[in-house]
């Protein structure tokens, strides 16, 4: 696994409130790749996403409620260049002791992803996104 993070997704209680904070409060500009249910911001060679907390927990197959749920409202993402690379990394992570939360599969938005947790329970998404190909150096550049 390359030593990098492609995308940090923050699970938020109120997307409109969070967008207001980042855009009006901090002056960030959303990416044209943003949609009604998710907002992206380009951050140099990586990106930040704001996504509904409950929807993010559901997507990663994690419990969103309770003080011992283990879900802190954030996932780390490692984007790759193909479905085959996603499958290989998921297998590598499992061999290394990761717990598979969601096996890699085609997803509703047109990509391919799966989730695992590291030994401390931090959730990682391993993803191929045909709409945001990686640069040669592995950096993620959102469209637009």
Image (cartoon, grey):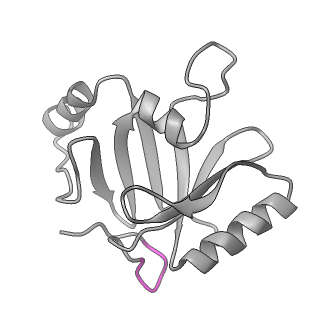
Q: Which of 134 and 129 is in front in this view?
A: 129
Is 4 drawn above or below residue 88 in the view shown? Answer: above
Give the position of the C terminus as an image quadrant. bottom left
Residue 13 position within the rendered picture, expressed as x and y whole percent measured from the top left: 36, 23
Instruction: Count up the numbered dots.
Output: 0
Is 24 drawn above or below residue 133 in the view shown? Answer: above
Q: Which of 72 and 58 is in front in this view?
A: 58
Q: In this view, does 34 lie to the left or right of 78?
A: left
Residue 95 position within the rendered picture, expressed as x and y whole percent measured from the top left: 86, 63
Q: Is residue 18 left or right of residue 66?
A: left
142 within the magenta span: no
Is 23 drawn above or below residue 141 in the view shown? Answer: above
Range covered by the magenta-colored residues: 134-139
Query: Looking at this rendering, what residue extends furthest in the left direction?
Result: 24
Q: Can residue 1 be seen in this view?
A: no
Q: In this view, does 44 lie to the left or right of 76?
A: left
> Could you tell me which residue is drawn at 45 percent across and 86 percent down?
136
Q: For residue 25, which quarter of the picture?
A: top left
Q: Main secondary structure of the magenta part?
A: loop
Give the position of the N terminus as an image quadrant. bottom right
> Could you tell me which residue is drawn at 20 percent across and 42 percent down?
36
Residue 125 position within the rendered picture, expressed as x and y whole percent measured from the top left: 57, 54
Q: For residue 44, which quarter of the picture?
A: bottom left
Q: In this view, does 122 lie to the left or right of 40?
A: right
> Could you tell me which residue is drawn at 43 percent across and 38 percent down?
10
């Amino acid at each position: 696994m390359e030593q990098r993070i492609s995308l940090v997704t923050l699970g938020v209680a109120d997307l409109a409130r969070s967008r207001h904070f980042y855009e009006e409060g901090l002056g960030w500009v959303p990416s044209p790749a943003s949609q009604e249910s998710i907002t992206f911001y380009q951050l140099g060679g990586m990106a930040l996403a704001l996504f509904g907390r409950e929807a993010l927990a559901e997507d990663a197959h994690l419990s969103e409620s309770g003080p011992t749920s283990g879900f802190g409202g954030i996932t780390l993402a490692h984007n790759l260049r193909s479905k085959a690379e996603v499958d290989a990394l998921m297998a590598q992570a499992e061999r290394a002791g990761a717990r598979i939360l969601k096996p890699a599969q085609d997803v509703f938005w047109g990509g391919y992803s799966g989730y695992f947790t590291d030994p401390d329970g931090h959730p990682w998404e391993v993803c191929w996104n045909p709409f945001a190909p990686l640069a040669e150096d592995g950096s993620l550049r959102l469209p637009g």
